[in-house]
Image: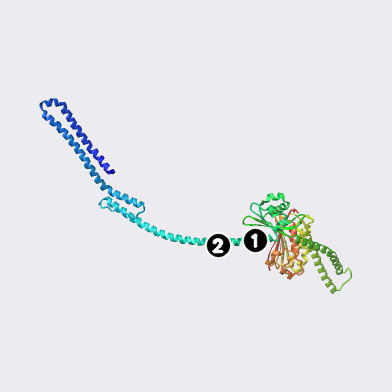
Amino acid sequence: MKISILNKIILILILIGVLPITIFTFLTIDSYQGLIEKYAPYVVKEYPEIVSETLLNFENIKNQTLFIFLLIIVFVFFFSIILSRKITYPIKKLTEATNELKKGNLDTRIVLKTKDEFEDLAESFNQMIQELQRSRALLEDEKAVLEIRVEARTKQLRELAQSLDEKVKERTRELRIQRDRIMAIITNLVDGLIVIDKDKNIVLVNPNAEKFLGIKAGDIQKKSIDKLIKKNNTIKELFNLINQKGEKNIFREEFALKDPQRLVLEVSTTLLETGETVIILHDITREKLVEEMKTDFVSIAAHQLRTPVSAIKWSLKMILDGDLGSIKKEQREFLEKAYESNDRMIRLINDLLNVSRIEEGRFLYNIQKKDIKDIINNVINRSKTIVEKKGLELQFLFPKKKIPDIEVDVEKIELAIQNLLDNAITYTKPGGKVTISIDYKEPYKELLISIKDTGVGIPKDEQKRIFSKFFRGSNAIKIDTDGSGLGLFIVKNIIEAHNGKIWFESKEGKGTTFYFTLPIHQKI
Protein backbone atom coordinates (compact mmCIF):
# COMPACT_ATOMS: atom_id res chain seq x y z
CA MET A 1 0.00 0.00 0.00
CA LYS A 2 1.29 3.46 -1.00
CA ILE A 3 1.75 5.75 2.03
CA SER A 4 1.11 9.42 1.25
CA ILE A 5 3.42 12.19 2.32
CA LEU A 6 0.78 13.42 4.80
CA ASN A 7 0.67 9.96 6.48
CA LYS A 8 4.41 9.95 6.78
CA ILE A 9 4.39 13.43 8.31
CA ILE A 10 1.73 12.44 10.91
CA LEU A 11 3.64 9.26 11.84
CA ILE A 12 6.84 11.19 12.27
CA LEU A 13 5.05 13.75 14.50
CA ILE A 14 3.57 10.96 16.61
CA LEU A 15 6.92 9.28 16.98
CA ILE A 16 8.53 12.60 17.88
CA GLY A 17 5.77 13.26 20.50
CA VAL A 18 5.02 9.82 21.99
CA LEU A 19 8.37 8.04 21.72
CA PRO A 20 10.25 10.32 24.17
CA ILE A 21 7.48 9.86 26.75
CA THR A 22 7.59 6.08 26.36
CA ILE A 23 11.39 6.04 26.60
CA PHE A 24 11.27 8.30 29.65
CA THR A 25 8.68 5.98 31.29
CA PHE A 26 10.82 2.92 30.61
CA LEU A 27 13.94 4.60 32.00
CA THR A 28 12.12 5.74 35.12
CA ILE A 29 10.78 2.22 35.78
CA ASP A 30 14.23 0.71 35.21
CA SER A 31 15.70 3.24 37.68
CA TYR A 32 13.17 2.27 40.33
CA GLN A 33 13.81 -1.43 39.67
CA GLY A 34 17.54 -0.87 40.05
CA LEU A 35 17.08 0.87 43.38
CA ILE A 36 14.84 -1.87 44.64
CA GLU A 37 17.25 -4.57 43.52
CA LYS A 38 20.10 -2.62 45.20
CA TYR A 39 18.40 -2.34 48.49
CA ALA A 40 16.36 -5.57 48.16
CA PRO A 41 18.59 -7.68 50.48
CA TYR A 42 17.75 -5.38 53.37
CA VAL A 43 14.08 -4.95 52.52
CA VAL A 44 13.40 -8.52 51.41
CA LYS A 45 14.28 -9.79 54.78
CA GLU A 46 11.68 -7.67 56.49
CA TYR A 47 9.13 -7.18 53.55
CA PRO A 48 9.59 -9.95 51.00
CA GLU A 49 6.00 -9.93 49.76
CA ILE A 50 5.91 -6.20 49.26
CA VAL A 51 9.11 -6.22 47.23
CA SER A 52 7.92 -8.99 44.92
CA GLU A 53 4.59 -7.29 44.38
CA THR A 54 6.29 -3.97 43.65
CA LEU A 55 8.61 -5.49 41.05
CA LEU A 56 5.67 -7.24 39.45
CA ASN A 57 3.76 -3.94 39.25
CA PHE A 58 6.72 -2.27 37.55
CA GLU A 59 6.75 -5.00 34.88
CA ASN A 60 3.03 -4.60 34.37
CA ILE A 61 3.42 -0.82 34.00
CA LYS A 62 6.16 -1.31 31.43
CA ASN A 63 4.05 -3.78 29.44
CA GLN A 64 0.99 -1.54 29.63
CA THR A 65 2.98 1.46 28.59
CA LEU A 66 4.40 -0.44 25.60
CA PHE A 67 0.92 -1.66 24.68
CA ILE A 68 -0.57 1.81 24.91
CA PHE A 69 2.32 3.17 22.80
CA LEU A 70 1.70 0.58 20.10
CA LEU A 71 -2.05 1.14 20.29
CA ILE A 72 -1.59 4.88 19.86
CA ILE A 73 0.65 4.29 16.86
CA VAL A 74 -1.88 1.96 15.21
CA PHE A 75 -4.74 4.38 15.97
CA VAL A 76 -2.87 7.37 14.67
CA PHE A 77 -1.76 5.44 11.59
CA PHE A 78 -5.30 4.56 10.59
CA PHE A 79 -6.56 8.03 11.54
CA SER A 80 -3.85 9.61 9.38
CA ILE A 81 -4.84 7.40 6.46
CA ILE A 82 -8.46 8.54 6.76
CA LEU A 83 -7.41 12.16 7.18
CA SER A 84 -4.94 12.07 4.31
CA ARG A 85 -7.55 10.56 2.03
CA LYS A 86 -9.89 13.36 2.88
CA ILE A 87 -7.17 15.94 2.17
CA THR A 88 -5.52 14.30 -0.88
CA TYR A 89 -8.80 13.43 -2.64
CA PRO A 90 -9.38 17.01 -3.88
CA ILE A 91 -5.74 17.30 -4.83
CA LYS A 92 -5.98 14.07 -6.77
CA LYS A 93 -9.07 15.35 -8.54
CA LEU A 94 -7.26 18.57 -9.42
CA THR A 95 -4.28 16.58 -10.71
CA GLU A 96 -6.49 14.38 -12.89
CA ALA A 97 -8.29 17.42 -14.29
CA THR A 98 -4.99 19.14 -15.00
CA ASN A 99 -3.72 16.09 -16.89
CA GLU A 100 -6.92 16.05 -18.95
CA LEU A 101 -6.49 19.74 -19.63
CA LYS A 102 -2.93 19.11 -20.84
CA LYS A 103 -4.34 16.59 -23.31
CA GLY A 104 -6.60 19.33 -24.69
CA ASN A 105 -9.82 18.05 -23.09
CA LEU A 106 -11.72 21.20 -22.14
CA ASP A 107 -14.88 19.26 -21.21
CA THR A 108 -13.41 17.98 -17.94
CA ARG A 109 -14.85 19.34 -14.68
CA ILE A 110 -14.06 18.96 -10.95
CA VAL A 111 -16.99 18.21 -8.62
CA LEU A 112 -16.11 18.71 -4.92
CA LYS A 113 -18.51 19.22 -1.99
CA THR A 114 -15.92 19.69 0.74
CA LYS A 115 -17.25 23.14 1.70
CA ASP A 116 -13.73 24.44 2.16
CA GLU A 117 -10.92 26.02 0.15
CA PHE A 118 -10.65 22.94 -2.10
CA GLU A 119 -14.24 23.44 -3.24
CA ASP A 120 -13.46 27.11 -4.02
CA LEU A 121 -10.32 26.04 -5.91
CA ALA A 122 -12.30 23.49 -7.91
CA GLU A 123 -14.93 26.13 -8.76
CA SER A 124 -12.19 28.53 -9.94
CA PHE A 125 -10.64 25.72 -12.01
CA ASN A 126 -14.00 25.01 -13.66
CA GLN A 127 -14.49 28.73 -14.43
CA MET A 128 -11.01 28.87 -15.93
CA ILE A 129 -11.86 25.90 -18.18
CA GLN A 130 -15.08 27.62 -19.26
CA GLU A 131 -13.12 30.75 -20.15
CA LEU A 132 -10.65 28.60 -22.06
CA GLN A 133 -13.56 26.99 -23.91
CA ARG A 134 -14.95 30.40 -24.86
CA SER A 135 -11.50 31.60 -25.95
CA ARG A 136 -11.02 28.41 -27.92
CA ALA A 137 -14.38 28.89 -29.62
CA LEU A 138 -13.46 32.50 -30.50
CA LEU A 139 -10.07 31.39 -31.80
CA GLU A 140 -11.70 28.69 -33.90
CA ASP A 141 -14.12 31.26 -35.32
CA GLU A 142 -11.26 33.64 -36.07
CA LYS A 143 -9.30 30.75 -37.51
CA ALA A 144 -12.20 29.91 -39.81
CA VAL A 145 -12.48 33.56 -40.88
CA LEU A 146 -8.72 33.76 -41.43
CA GLU A 147 -8.75 30.54 -43.41
CA ILE A 148 -11.48 31.98 -45.64
CA ARG A 149 -9.52 35.22 -46.04
CA VAL A 150 -6.27 33.38 -46.66
CA GLU A 151 -7.96 31.16 -49.22
CA ALA A 152 -9.47 34.19 -50.95
CA ARG A 153 -6.18 36.08 -50.82
CA THR A 154 -4.31 33.02 -52.05
CA LYS A 155 -6.73 32.74 -54.94
CA GLN A 156 -6.33 36.46 -55.65
CA LEU A 157 -2.53 36.20 -55.49
CA ARG A 158 -2.60 33.13 -57.69
CA GLU A 159 -4.70 35.00 -60.26
CA LEU A 160 -2.43 38.05 -59.92
CA ALA A 161 0.67 35.90 -60.31
CA GLN A 162 -0.86 34.29 -63.37
CA SER A 163 -1.73 37.72 -64.77
CA LEU A 164 1.75 39.05 -64.00
CA ASP A 165 3.29 35.99 -65.58
CA GLU A 166 1.26 36.60 -68.73
CA LYS A 167 2.20 40.31 -68.69
CA VAL A 168 5.87 39.45 -68.15
CA LYS A 169 5.76 37.03 -71.04
CA GLU A 170 4.02 39.61 -73.22
CA ARG A 171 6.46 42.35 -72.16
CA THR A 172 9.39 40.00 -72.74
CA ARG A 173 8.07 39.26 -76.19
CA GLU A 174 7.64 42.99 -76.90
CA LEU A 175 11.14 43.74 -75.60
CA ARG A 176 12.55 40.94 -77.74
CA ILE A 177 10.76 42.34 -80.79
CA GLN A 178 11.94 45.85 -79.87
CA ARG A 179 15.50 44.61 -79.35
CA ASP A 180 15.45 42.81 -82.69
CA ARG A 181 14.05 45.95 -84.33
CA ILE A 182 16.74 48.14 -82.74
CA MET A 183 19.46 45.67 -83.71
CA ALA A 184 18.11 45.60 -87.27
CA ILE A 185 18.18 49.42 -87.36
CA ILE A 186 21.69 49.52 -85.89
CA THR A 187 22.90 46.84 -88.30
CA ASN A 188 21.45 48.61 -91.34
CA LEU A 189 22.25 52.14 -90.17
CA VAL A 190 24.13 54.10 -92.81
CA ASP A 191 26.27 55.66 -90.07
CA GLY A 192 28.88 53.80 -88.08
CA LEU A 193 27.98 53.15 -84.44
CA ILE A 194 30.26 52.28 -81.53
CA VAL A 195 29.04 51.88 -77.92
CA ILE A 196 31.46 52.07 -74.98
CA ASP A 197 30.48 51.11 -71.43
CA LYS A 198 31.40 53.09 -68.32
CA ASP A 199 34.48 50.89 -67.81
CA LYS A 200 35.81 51.98 -71.22
CA ASN A 201 35.17 48.65 -72.92
CA ILE A 202 33.70 48.47 -76.44
CA VAL A 203 30.37 46.62 -76.21
CA LEU A 204 28.87 47.17 -79.68
CA VAL A 205 30.14 47.86 -83.20
CA ASN A 206 27.79 47.92 -86.20
CA PRO A 207 28.78 46.78 -89.72
CA ASN A 208 29.34 50.29 -91.12
CA ALA A 209 31.69 51.15 -88.23
CA GLU A 210 33.63 47.99 -89.13
CA LYS A 211 33.69 49.12 -92.76
CA PHE A 212 34.76 52.70 -92.02
CA LEU A 213 37.53 51.79 -89.58
CA GLY A 214 38.68 48.63 -91.36
CA ILE A 215 38.13 46.42 -88.30
CA LYS A 216 36.10 43.38 -87.27
CA ALA A 217 33.63 43.59 -84.39
CA GLY A 218 34.79 40.29 -82.97
CA ASP A 219 38.33 41.61 -82.65
CA ILE A 220 37.44 44.66 -80.52
CA GLN A 221 34.15 43.92 -78.73
CA LYS A 222 34.41 43.42 -74.95
CA LYS A 223 37.95 44.74 -75.03
CA SER A 224 39.44 47.75 -73.28
CA ILE A 225 40.11 50.90 -75.31
CA ASP A 226 43.49 51.28 -73.60
CA LYS A 227 44.59 47.93 -75.03
CA LEU A 228 43.09 48.52 -78.49
CA ILE A 229 44.79 51.90 -79.09
CA LYS A 230 48.16 50.19 -78.66
CA LYS A 231 47.37 47.75 -81.49
CA ASN A 232 45.29 49.78 -83.95
CA ASN A 233 46.38 53.24 -85.21
CA THR A 234 42.93 54.13 -86.59
CA ILE A 235 41.26 53.52 -83.24
CA LYS A 236 44.09 55.39 -81.53
CA GLU A 237 43.58 58.48 -83.74
CA LEU A 238 39.79 58.32 -83.28
CA PHE A 239 39.99 58.23 -79.48
CA ASN A 240 42.72 60.86 -79.43
CA LEU A 241 40.20 63.18 -81.13
CA ILE A 242 37.48 62.19 -78.64
CA ASN A 243 39.76 62.70 -75.64
CA GLN A 244 40.89 66.11 -76.92
CA LYS A 245 37.34 67.38 -77.34
CA GLY A 246 35.81 65.56 -74.36
CA GLU A 247 33.19 62.84 -74.70
CA LYS A 248 30.28 65.19 -73.93
CA ASN A 249 31.28 68.01 -76.28
CA ILE A 250 31.77 66.34 -79.65
CA PHE A 251 29.33 67.18 -82.43
CA ARG A 252 30.15 66.67 -86.10
CA GLU A 253 33.92 66.86 -85.67
CA GLU A 254 35.75 65.91 -88.85
CA PHE A 255 37.98 62.85 -88.74
CA ALA A 256 40.03 62.06 -91.86
CA LEU A 257 41.18 58.47 -92.35
CA LYS A 258 44.50 57.82 -94.05
CA ASP A 259 45.22 55.38 -96.85
CA PRO A 260 43.89 53.16 -98.20
CA GLN A 261 40.30 54.31 -97.60
CA ARG A 262 40.87 58.08 -97.41
CA LEU A 263 37.43 58.58 -95.87
CA VAL A 264 36.28 61.74 -94.13
CA LEU A 265 33.97 61.05 -91.19
CA GLU A 266 31.94 63.32 -88.93
CA VAL A 267 32.30 62.16 -85.30
CA SER A 268 29.56 62.87 -82.74
CA THR A 269 29.23 61.45 -79.24
CA THR A 270 26.29 61.04 -76.85
CA LEU A 271 26.58 60.18 -73.16
CA LEU A 272 23.71 57.97 -71.98
CA GLU A 273 22.17 57.96 -68.48
CA THR A 274 23.59 54.45 -67.99
CA GLY A 275 27.11 55.86 -68.25
CA GLU A 276 27.64 54.39 -71.72
CA THR A 277 28.99 56.50 -74.58
CA VAL A 278 27.63 56.25 -78.13
CA ILE A 279 30.00 57.26 -80.94
CA ILE A 280 28.37 58.05 -84.29
CA LEU A 281 30.50 58.03 -87.46
CA HIS A 282 28.89 59.75 -90.44
CA ASP A 283 30.59 59.38 -93.82
CA ILE A 284 30.90 62.82 -95.48
CA THR A 285 33.56 61.81 -98.00
CA ARG A 286 31.25 62.43 -100.96
CA GLU A 287 30.01 65.75 -99.52
CA LYS A 288 33.57 66.90 -98.90
CA LEU A 289 34.55 65.91 -102.42
CA VAL A 290 31.55 67.75 -103.91
CA GLU A 291 32.24 70.74 -101.66
CA GLU A 292 35.87 70.75 -102.68
CA MET A 293 34.87 70.61 -106.33
CA LYS A 294 32.40 73.47 -105.82
CA THR A 295 35.04 75.49 -104.02
CA ASP A 296 37.53 74.88 -106.83
CA PHE A 297 34.91 75.81 -109.42
CA VAL A 298 33.90 78.98 -107.55
CA SER A 299 37.55 79.92 -107.05
CA ILE A 300 38.41 79.37 -110.73
CA ALA A 301 35.23 81.08 -111.93
CA ALA A 302 35.74 84.04 -109.59
CA HIS A 303 39.34 84.47 -110.70
CA GLN A 304 38.36 84.20 -114.34
CA LEU A 305 35.56 86.74 -113.89
CA ARG A 306 37.52 89.14 -111.76
CA THR A 307 39.81 90.38 -114.56
CA PRO A 308 37.17 91.19 -117.23
CA VAL A 309 34.79 92.65 -114.62
CA SER A 310 37.56 94.87 -113.28
CA ALA A 311 38.36 95.94 -116.85
CA ILE A 312 34.70 96.81 -117.39
CA LYS A 313 34.71 98.84 -114.16
CA TRP A 314 37.70 100.94 -115.19
CA SER A 315 36.33 101.38 -118.70
CA LEU A 316 32.99 102.63 -117.37
CA LYS A 317 34.85 104.86 -114.92
CA MET A 318 36.86 106.44 -117.74
CA ILE A 319 33.70 107.08 -119.78
CA LEU A 320 31.89 108.60 -116.78
CA ASP A 321 34.91 110.80 -115.98
CA GLY A 322 34.89 112.11 -119.59
CA ASP A 323 38.29 110.69 -120.50
CA LEU A 324 36.85 109.39 -123.78
CA GLY A 325 34.81 112.48 -124.57
CA SER A 326 31.59 114.04 -123.34
CA ILE A 327 28.43 112.00 -122.95
CA LYS A 328 24.78 112.94 -122.77
CA LYS A 329 22.73 113.00 -119.54
CA GLU A 330 20.69 109.95 -120.53
CA GLN A 331 23.86 108.06 -121.44
CA ARG A 332 25.38 108.98 -118.05
CA GLU A 333 22.36 107.60 -116.17
CA PHE A 334 22.58 104.26 -117.99
CA LEU A 335 26.36 104.09 -117.52
CA GLU A 336 26.09 104.90 -113.78
CA LYS A 337 23.58 102.06 -113.36
CA ALA A 338 25.92 99.75 -115.26
CA TYR A 339 28.82 100.93 -113.08
CA GLU A 340 26.85 100.19 -109.86
CA SER A 341 25.83 96.77 -111.14
CA ASN A 342 29.41 96.02 -112.13
CA ASP A 343 30.58 97.15 -108.68
CA ARG A 344 28.11 94.78 -107.03
CA MET A 345 29.43 92.00 -109.26
CA ILE A 346 32.99 92.74 -108.13
CA ARG A 347 31.90 92.64 -104.45
CA LEU A 348 30.17 89.30 -105.07
CA ILE A 349 33.29 87.91 -106.75
CA ASN A 350 35.40 89.11 -103.82
CA ASP A 351 32.97 87.46 -101.38
CA LEU A 352 33.15 84.19 -103.34
CA LEU A 353 36.95 84.33 -103.32
CA ASN A 354 36.93 85.00 -99.56
CA VAL A 355 34.60 82.04 -98.99
CA SER A 356 36.89 79.88 -101.12
CA ARG A 357 39.92 80.91 -99.04
CA ILE A 358 37.99 80.27 -95.80
CA GLU A 359 37.05 76.75 -96.87
CA GLU A 360 40.63 76.06 -97.97
CA GLY A 361 41.88 77.20 -94.55
CA ARG A 362 44.16 79.91 -95.94
CA PHE A 363 42.41 83.09 -94.93
CA LEU A 364 44.72 84.98 -92.55
CA TYR A 365 48.00 86.16 -94.06
CA ASN A 366 49.35 89.28 -92.39
CA ILE A 367 49.10 89.36 -88.59
CA GLN A 368 50.30 92.67 -87.12
CA LYS A 369 49.74 94.87 -84.07
CA LYS A 370 47.22 97.62 -84.65
CA ASP A 371 45.06 100.07 -82.70
CA ILE A 372 41.44 98.85 -83.04
CA LYS A 373 40.19 102.46 -82.94
CA ASP A 374 42.17 103.26 -86.11
CA ILE A 375 40.71 100.23 -87.88
CA ILE A 376 37.15 101.20 -86.95
CA ASN A 377 37.71 104.87 -87.89
CA ASN A 378 38.90 103.79 -91.35
CA VAL A 379 35.68 101.80 -91.82
CA ILE A 380 33.54 104.70 -90.54
CA ASN A 381 35.23 107.16 -92.91
CA ARG A 382 34.42 104.94 -95.90
CA SER A 383 30.76 104.84 -94.87
CA LYS A 384 30.18 108.52 -93.98
CA THR A 385 28.73 109.43 -97.36
CA ILE A 386 25.95 106.85 -97.30
CA VAL A 387 25.27 107.52 -93.59
CA GLU A 388 24.75 111.20 -94.32
CA LYS A 389 22.71 110.41 -97.44
CA LYS A 390 20.27 108.24 -95.38
CA GLY A 391 20.15 110.76 -92.54
CA LEU A 392 21.39 108.27 -89.91
CA GLU A 393 23.12 109.07 -86.65
CA LEU A 394 26.44 107.18 -86.37
CA GLN A 395 28.05 107.11 -82.92
CA PHE A 396 31.46 105.66 -81.98
CA LEU A 397 32.03 104.98 -78.24
CA PHE A 398 35.34 103.86 -76.74
CA PRO A 399 37.03 103.99 -73.30
CA LYS A 400 39.04 107.05 -72.29
CA LYS A 401 41.90 104.93 -71.00
CA LYS A 402 44.51 103.53 -73.31
CA ILE A 403 43.47 100.37 -75.16
CA PRO A 404 46.35 98.01 -75.98
CA ASP A 405 47.06 97.26 -79.62
CA ILE A 406 45.78 93.90 -80.86
CA GLU A 407 47.33 91.34 -83.16
CA VAL A 408 45.09 90.95 -86.21
CA ASP A 409 45.01 90.64 -89.97
CA VAL A 410 44.00 94.29 -90.52
CA GLU A 411 42.50 93.75 -93.97
CA LYS A 412 40.25 90.90 -92.77
CA ILE A 413 39.12 92.65 -89.56
CA GLU A 414 38.27 95.77 -91.57
CA LEU A 415 36.26 93.55 -93.92
CA ALA A 416 34.36 92.00 -90.97
CA ILE A 417 33.57 95.38 -89.37
CA GLN A 418 32.66 96.85 -92.77
CA ASN A 419 30.18 94.03 -93.43
CA LEU A 420 28.54 94.47 -90.00
CA LEU A 421 28.37 98.27 -90.41
CA ASP A 422 27.02 97.98 -93.98
CA ASN A 423 24.23 95.71 -92.72
CA ALA A 424 23.40 98.11 -89.90
CA ILE A 425 23.22 101.05 -92.33
CA THR A 426 21.33 99.16 -95.03
CA TYR A 427 18.60 97.76 -92.76
CA THR A 428 18.08 100.88 -90.61
CA LYS A 429 15.41 103.32 -91.80
CA PRO A 430 16.27 106.99 -92.38
CA GLY A 431 16.51 108.91 -89.11
CA GLY A 432 17.68 105.80 -87.23
CA LYS A 433 20.82 105.35 -85.19
CA VAL A 434 23.91 103.12 -85.44
CA THR A 435 26.31 102.81 -82.49
CA ILE A 436 29.78 101.22 -82.49
CA SER A 437 31.25 100.52 -79.04
CA ILE A 438 34.57 99.18 -77.73
CA ASP A 439 35.08 97.71 -74.26
CA TYR A 440 38.37 96.38 -72.92
CA LYS A 441 37.94 93.21 -70.84
CA GLU A 442 41.23 93.42 -68.98
CA PRO A 443 40.90 90.21 -66.89
CA TYR A 444 40.34 88.21 -70.11
CA LYS A 445 42.90 90.13 -72.19
CA GLU A 446 40.37 90.72 -74.95
CA LEU A 447 38.31 93.47 -76.62
CA LEU A 448 34.53 93.43 -76.89
CA ILE A 449 33.21 95.29 -79.95
CA SER A 450 29.50 95.82 -80.57
CA ILE A 451 27.58 97.33 -83.52
CA LYS A 452 24.03 98.28 -82.61
CA ASP A 453 21.28 99.56 -84.91
CA THR A 454 17.62 100.54 -84.68
CA GLY A 455 16.75 98.70 -87.87
CA VAL A 456 14.25 96.03 -88.90
CA GLY A 457 15.75 93.29 -86.71
CA ILE A 458 15.93 89.56 -87.44
CA PRO A 459 12.83 87.31 -87.26
CA LYS A 460 13.07 84.96 -84.28
CA ASP A 461 12.49 81.79 -86.32
CA GLU A 462 15.37 82.72 -88.68
CA GLN A 463 18.00 83.68 -86.09
CA LYS A 464 19.58 80.21 -85.89
CA ARG A 465 20.52 80.35 -89.60
CA ILE A 466 21.83 83.90 -89.70
CA PHE A 467 25.52 82.85 -90.01
CA SER A 468 24.79 80.21 -92.67
CA LYS A 469 26.27 80.53 -96.14
CA PHE A 470 23.94 82.20 -98.71
CA PHE A 471 21.20 82.75 -96.10
CA ARG A 472 19.30 86.06 -95.92
CA GLY A 473 16.41 87.01 -93.67
CA SER A 474 12.98 87.27 -95.25
CA ASN A 475 12.57 90.90 -94.18
CA ALA A 476 16.11 91.76 -95.40
CA ILE A 477 15.35 90.49 -98.92
CA LYS A 478 12.40 92.89 -99.15
CA ILE A 479 14.66 95.87 -98.34
CA ASP A 480 17.75 94.91 -100.39
CA THR A 481 17.34 92.36 -103.16
CA ASP A 482 20.99 92.47 -104.25
CA GLY A 483 22.68 90.85 -101.22
CA SER A 484 24.63 87.59 -101.59
CA GLY A 485 24.02 86.10 -98.12
CA LEU A 486 27.76 85.61 -97.66
CA GLY A 487 28.60 88.64 -95.52
CA LEU A 488 27.82 87.26 -92.03
CA PHE A 489 29.29 83.86 -92.98
CA ILE A 490 32.56 85.63 -93.84
CA VAL A 491 32.40 87.78 -90.68
CA LYS A 492 31.93 84.73 -88.43
CA ASN A 493 34.85 82.90 -90.00
CA ILE A 494 37.13 85.98 -89.75
CA ILE A 495 36.34 86.43 -86.03
CA GLU A 496 36.74 82.72 -85.23
CA ALA A 497 39.99 82.61 -87.24
CA HIS A 498 41.26 85.29 -84.81
CA ASN A 499 40.21 83.02 -81.85
CA GLY A 500 37.30 85.33 -81.08
CA LYS A 501 33.59 84.77 -80.59
CA ILE A 502 30.61 86.40 -82.28
CA TRP A 503 26.92 86.51 -81.30
CA PHE A 504 23.95 88.84 -81.55
CA GLU A 505 20.74 90.02 -79.88
CA SER A 506 17.81 91.01 -82.06
CA LYS A 507 14.12 91.79 -81.88
CA GLU A 508 12.13 92.13 -85.07
CA GLY A 509 11.11 95.74 -85.70
CA LYS A 510 13.35 97.04 -82.86
CA GLY A 511 16.88 96.52 -84.09
CA THR A 512 19.93 94.25 -83.78
CA THR A 513 23.20 94.32 -81.86
CA PHE A 514 26.15 92.22 -83.03
CA TYR A 515 28.92 91.48 -80.50
CA PHE A 516 32.33 89.97 -81.11
CA THR A 517 35.49 89.53 -79.06
CA LEU A 518 39.13 89.67 -80.16
CA PRO A 519 42.03 88.50 -77.98
CA ILE A 520 44.89 90.98 -77.55
CA HIS A 521 47.48 88.34 -78.51
CA GLN A 522 46.99 85.80 -81.26
CA LYS A 523 48.03 82.16 -81.41
CA ILE A 524 47.31 81.52 -85.05
Q: Quadrant of the N terminus?
A: top left
Q: Measure the C-alpha gap from mark 1 to mark 2.
A: 24 Å
The reply, left or right, for residue 225 in relation to residue 80 is right
Q: Quadrant of residue 429?
A: bottom right
Residue at the limit of the structure toward the right, as seen here: 325
Instruction: Tell me the residue at 24%/42% (across/down).
Output: 77
The residue wearing badge 2 is: 166
Dot 1: within a 10 Å radius of its alpha carbon, few (fewer than 14), some, or many (20 or more) residues?
few
In this figure, which residue is indicated by the disc labeled 1? 182
Q: Is residue 373 visible?
A: yes
Residue 126 position, x and y percent, is: 31, 54
> Which residue does the image show at 11% across and 28% down from the upper left?
48
Specify few, some or many for label 2: CA neighbours under 10 Å numbering under 14, 14-19, or 20 or more. few
Relative to the observer, which residue lies in front, 143 or 486?
A: 143
- Name the kind of residue labelled 2 in the image: Glu
Label ID, residue 74: none
